[in-house]
Each structure stands twice: as structure tokens, then as C-alpha cells.
Amino acid sequence: MPGSRRGDWHDEAVSPTYSGNTPGNGAAARAQDAAVALLEAVRGELASLRLPLELPAAPGARRTAAKAVGQLDDYILPRYRSLDAPLLAVVGGSTGAGKSTLVNALAGHPVTRAGAIRPTTRQPILLHHPADAAWFTSARVLPTLARVRGELDGAGTPATRAGATPDAAAMRSLVLVSDAAIPEGVALLDAPDVDSVSDDNRQLASQLLAAADLWLFVTTANRYADAVPWKLLVDAASRDILVAVVLDRVPRGAEEEVRADLRSMLTREGLAGSRLFVVPELDLDAMGMLPAAATAPIAGWLRDLAEDATVRSEIARRTLNGTVRSLSGKVAGLAEAARDQDDAGRQLADDVTAAFTDAGARIHRATSDGSLLRGEVLARWQDFVGTGDFFRALESGIGRVRDRLGAFFKGQPPPAVKVETAIETGLQAVIVAQASRAAEDADQRWRADPAGRALLGTDDLSGTTPDFPAQVAEEIRAWQGDVLDLIRAGGAAKRSQARWLSLGVNGLGVVLMVVVFSLTGGLTGAEIGIAGGTAVVGQKLLEAVFGEDAVRRLASQARRSLEKRCAGLLERQQRRFLDRIGPLHDGAADTLEGLAGELAKLGEGA
């Protein structure tokens, strides 16, 4: 490169906390290892971060997390692991600003294609000194981009040994060109347009700029105030990255005016220390090259950087620390996003839980206040006990119930199975109805919330699953089996009263079920007398067989068994909602918050 005086780069020195891992520098080596371990922990946490709920800030947070992981892989971790690697100077800027022309001028011969058709830079080209090849042929930096070894053809553009690279593959590959014209210690990377019409080009340009140790940002006299480049320059200021702005194609006579205006803008945006180079509007030669003198100050500045190891080290550390500080702010923001997700997820979960808790409470009332003894269940119970003779016998006094019940049941009782069937049918109707109501309630609550609405999508969860009635019937039969097992266990402990077991296990089981259901709280009029009478008779009968304390215990156990099975049925239905939320209370927000604090200290050199 043509020589020039050293540029006025005089920004404050970066803290030397993270120096190279040189022999005898054990403390620095340990600090470097600790920094790498912290950064790897941050990368793992960000890579596993899940923000499934469609909150207003969620899309931006997901993009931030993905870009942060990419920057850790492309730049931060590689630079911490190899602090003495050559500087990577990325040449970026707007469409048609003259990036490729500048790169060719700095190399002293045509290297990359420049032209009027946009976008021209489809495949990034990295120029490096032959002695620096090992730093870039590996996946040390930009590991997601495949390496393609390039040679300069007769036209002055890189050609791969394997031939032309298709555009799709080119966008994910990096052409490496070894060129002795590039000073050892600094590599140049020609990036796509930051405002390209191609989404892929813009994303790649952003990725490459995020992996840079310093920027050569190219703009023109009539485009330097455009919004897109300034957004990137402001990001550079937040990273404290060294930026050299190349103001290209400045009309003769307007240099000082345009320079002053651009310098004022840079100062306002926190980039007062940036170098500013002005390239006048000049005709290109037959090979599309600028006169060497036009870019000599830029070439000299880069050469001075390359020759001064101390300055290179300061630049690398300054950019690295600034990037880590910027990453700390992003991680803190992601911690807040994760906390918002947890809060929103808990609210959605609470909505579902409340709906199904209410359903459980309604089922409890219906199965404990006598409501189930209406209709078919009551009719089958009356058939079972023979209401007329049975209640006339009770009129003589409940105190002699053992003798009266014993005499009454010496005959063959009607089948208890009809009562069991009626209980199953009635109980199934109650559970299915209340679960459906809960599902409808939960569905409506979610659809009133944007995050819940997104989780539901086009699915309709406002009813129970098709197999739910069959599941309920199966659970009720299982509960009835539990009741019969309780009767068998209680009868085995009362062998002296085995004569009462002539009623049969099923008969006593039915009586226990009716006792569980008939507290009469929900009945009115004549039903109270009927249900109340059946409850009293059933309870006294069981007390005659098992004893008063045992009956209370049996009824309590039967009630708990029923409630447990009902809760399981409702839980399966509400799980359809909760599974869509994903895990809650996983501690991601607290972890990210703690990592953000550690990154802030690392970025400050603490």
C-alpha cells in the first residue's frame, strides 16, 4: 500500500486486563480462561433461551438473542481465545458507495468486482497477507461461513480452484485471497451492501460488521445522511469500535463543507474519535481503478496500524471490551423479556387453572350435596331398598334399625348393579358438563389475550377431547371398584357381623356411594325428605355393620378417591392448554440477569 503519515487515532487506551496468554503471565492466562468460560456460559444460555409467547417485544428479543449468539461465535469468543490474531477490518457501506473500488485501490490491483448492477458484492472476499493465512483458513472467526480458497484470475477477480460458486452457496461462503499487497497484521473483508435490495445480503453484511475489529465505512457525498448506515454507525458507537469513515465521490470544491457536516454528525452520535477520509470524485482508469494518490492516506493509516503491535492490541481490546459491554445490555434486555414471558405464561396458566379449579369445585358440590340423587339415581335407589315397606319400617323408630333392616333384607334385594349404572351415568354427565364448561372458559380467556390467541392458533379447545366421556366412565367404574374394595376390607375386619354381609359387597357398596352423595344441600321440597331418609338409612345400615367410626372413615376414603380421580380427569383436559405454554419458572430471567452483571464487569476490565 502507498505510504502516508500515521492517522490521528488517539482514543483512550483500553484496559489491559485481558492480555495475551504469554509464558509467565499466569494471572492474565487465568483471567482469559475465566472470561472465555463466562462467555461460553452466556452463549449456552442464549442458545437455549425460549420465548414462545407472542408478546409485543418477543420478535425483537428473539432476533437479539440469535444475533448475540452469532456475534459470540463469529467474533467475541474467537477474539478472546486468540488476542494476538490479525485485526479484521470490514469494509461496509451503502449500495453504490464504492466499497469494492476502495478495496481494489487499497490492494493496488483489481481484486473484487465493482459495477452498476446491484447488488454487486454477493460473496464476501477476505484479503490477507500470506503470513496470516492460518488465522483465517480455519473456522476461528465466522465459523458458519464455508471457506473457499481464491486466486486472482487475469481479470483481477478471485476465481476458486473448483470453478464458479453458485449464488446460494456463495452467500454462505467466504472467499480467502492471499495477497502480499495486504500488510501483515490486518485483513480486509469486502462486505455486501448494508441497504441491499437482497435480504440475504443485508443480513450477511450485518453479520460481517458484527465480527469486525474495526470498520472502514464507505459512504458518498450525497448519501452520507441516509438512515440505514447511521443506524449501524450508532451501533458501532455503542460497541466502542474503531470506525474510519470514507466519504467517497466528493465534488471538487465541496470537500471542506461536506467534511464539516459529516464530522458534526459523527460527533453528535458519539463517534467524534472516528477517522474521516475524503476521496474526491475522480474518473476510473480502464481497469476500474482509482488513482493511487486518492486512497494513499487510507492505505498508510492501515499500514501504520499493522506495523504497530501495541496499537493493534489496543484496538482489539477496545473493540472487544466495548462489544462485551454492548452484549451485557442485550443480555439484560433479554432477561427482562424472559421475565415478561414468565409473567405472561403464569397469567395464561392461572386463567386455565382457575377455570378448571372452578369446575372441580362444582363437581364437588354436585357430588356432596345430594344433587346426584335426583332423577334416575334416586329411582333406582328406591327400587333397590323398596321405598314403601322400607320407610314404614323406619317410622317405628330408628333406634331398632338393625333388627328391622335385618328382617327387611332376609329376602333377595333387587340388583345393586342398576343403582351403580345410574350413578355412573349421572356422575359422568356432571363431570363431562363441568369439564366442557371449564375448557370453554379457558379458551375464551386465552382468545382475549394476544399471547393466548397465538398459542391456540386455529385450534378449538373450547370443548373436551372426543375420548373424554369414555375416560370419565372408566374412572367412575374404577372408583366404584375402590368403594367395593373398601367394603371388602371393612367386612374382613368385622367377621363377627358377617351376617350383614348377606346383603353382598355390591349392595353395601351402593349404600356407601349413596351416603357419599346425599348430604341434601342442593335439594328442595319433597326431595329433601326422600334423599335425607335414604342418607340416614344408608348411614345407619353401614354403622350397624361396621360401626360409626368406621363408616365415617369409609365415607371419607371414598370421597377422597372420587375427588382424586375427578382431579386427574380435569388435569388431563387442562394439560392441553398448559403444554402449549411450555415450562415456567425455569429461572432463565434470573440467570440472564446475573450473567449480564458479570459481562458488564468483564467489559469494564473489572
Image (tube, helix red, strand yellow):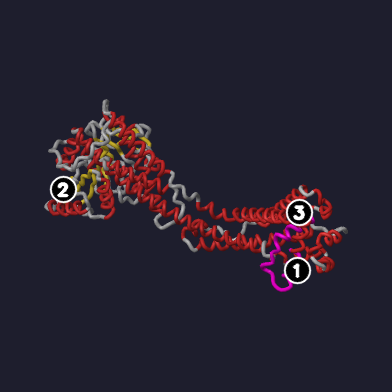
* Label 2, residues with CA under 10 Å away: few <14, some 14-19, many ≥20: some
Select label 2 or label 3 by which is in front. 3
Q: CA distance from mark 2 to mark 1?
A: 105 Å
- What is the magenta segment's predominant secondary structure? helix
Residue type for callout 3: Phe
Residue position for label 3 = 546
**Magenta segment range?**
506-535
Residue position for label 2 = 280
Q: Is residue 567 above or below residue 323?
A: below
Residue type for callout 2: Pro
Identified at 81% across, 69% down, the residue is 395
Residue position for label 1 = 530
Identified at 71% across, 74% down, the residue is 525
Q: Residue furthest right?
A: 411
User: Where, by quadrant of the figure, is residue 189 drawn?
Assistant: top left
Q: Nearer the viewer, residue 480 or 99?
A: 480
Q: Nearer the viewer, residue 442 or 421?
A: 421
Tell me: 349 left or right of 228.
Answer: right
Asked whether the viewer can see residue 571, the reply is: yes
Tell me: 366 left or right of 166.
Answer: right
